[in-house]
Image: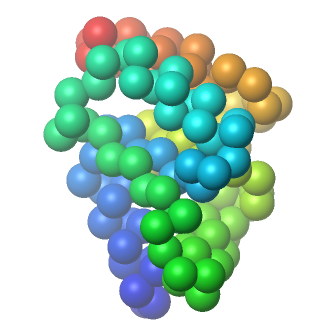
Amino acid sequence: MSEAESFIDSMLSHHLIAVVVYSSIPACQAVLDNISLLQIRSKDLVILDLDEFDGEEATELRQYLYKITHRYDMPFVFFRGTDIPSVYGVDKGDFYFSELQQQLYRNGRQ
């Protein structure tokens, strides 16, 4: 298992919600803004900003994300280790916010 795989797998298994973004991309920033409105406890949320990694590291992380989600588009939002867009087949927009909010309500987190 590569470092990228171990890093992502650990992140997904230890947090209720995991978000992977490039904060420099407007669509990613919009998702971060919406998620902040949910007032999720910090222990339940991890945000991985790929802008903070060098190009090679970010590429390795994205390759593994593709392997587990079968998509390249950003951002990635995981709830209990499941990629919300991949499971629900929802197009871009504020779906991350609404779907994540629904998941949290269903699971008694709000």
Tell which residue pokes out farthest to the front in this image: 24
Residue drawn 69% across the image and 31% down it: 88
Residue 108 vs residue 44, the one in the foreground? 44
> 98 above or below 69?
above
70 with respect to 19 (left or right) = right
Residue 51 vs residue 82, the one in the foreground? 51
Whole-percent x, y for residue 22 in the image? 60, 55
Residue 2 visible from this viewpoint: yes
Residue 107 vs residue 53, the one in the foreground? 53
72 with respect to 19 (left or right) = right
Whole-percent x, y for residue 14 in the image? 25, 53
Residue drawn 47% across the image and 46% down it: 19
Looking at the rendered image, the quarter that the N terminus falls into is bottom left
Whole-percent x, y for residue 23 in the image? 57, 49
Residue drawn 59% across the image and 37% down it: 29
Looking at the rendered image, the quarter that the C terminus falls into is top left
Residue drawn 21% across the image and 35% down it: 42
